[in-house]
Image: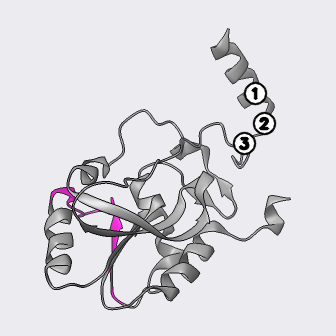
Amino acid sequence: SLMKKPTPYLEIAKAANRLQGGGLFIDSHFARPQTDGEYFGRMVFVDEPGWIADKLPDLIDEYLKINKPVYITGQALSEPYGLFSGPFLHPLSLSYKNGLILSYLKDKYRFSEVESVDDIYNLNVFQISKGTGGFPQINNLSESRRRIDWLDPFRIMSVDLLRH
């Protein structure tokens, strides 16, 4: 039934097209093939090779200083977890072993939702502004029925073994 539903990253690409252009759009590197070039402004993809996390606040501040919009996806905020492969979640990105890469942004910026594709799967677009507050809840997707391996008997047995 998931194959009949819209592909999450393509839905985010449509949302990016509807945003005010000329600003900054921050997205997950997992979504790059589907969302690259879909926003009419500068796009930055979190955790790509050569990407420097410490420089992101400077870039955001640069755009905010000249009153240009700054957008970020829920997928970027959930990085490095929640990779979609078509309509399915890929299990390799669902360990939630380490913290979220961009969690430090909540201490410096305010977030307001401007587009929502699916809150449960962190498929939203937020506008970043000066101040603090409104940091979105990032959902842990490790037990989601959208996992590619959801019905895999080995996954089911391993989960049952871990619970006992």
SS under mark 1: helix
**Relative to 77, 87 lies left or right:** right
Report how far apart the C-alphas of labels 3 and 1 lie in the structure.
9 Å
Within the magenta stretch, is there residue 47?
yes
Report how far apart the C-alphas of labels 3 and 2 lie in the structure.
5 Å
The image quarter containing residue 65 is bottom left
The colour scheme is one colour
> Disc 3, disc 2: CB below 8 Å?
yes
Q: Amino acid at mark 3?
A: Asp
Please report the residue visible at 33 percent of the width from the left and 58 percent of the height from the top: 47
Q: Which residue is mark 3?
A: 149
The image quarter containing residue 42 is bottom left
Bounds of the magenta segment: 41-54
> 117 or 157, which is in the foreground?
117
Q: Amino acid at mark 2?
A: Asp
Image location of residue 162, percent across then percent down: 63, 15
Q: Which residue is mark 1?
A: 156
> Disc 3, disc 1: CB below 8 Å?
no
> 23 or 161, which is in the foreground?
23
Please report the residue visible at 60 percent of the width from the left and 38 percent of the height from the top: 142
Image location of residue 119, percent across then percent down: 59, 57
Q: Residues within 10 Å of mark 3 (few under 14, many from 20)?
A: some
Q: Which residue is mark 2?
A: 152
Q: Residues within 10 Å of mark 2 (few under 14, many from 20)?
A: few
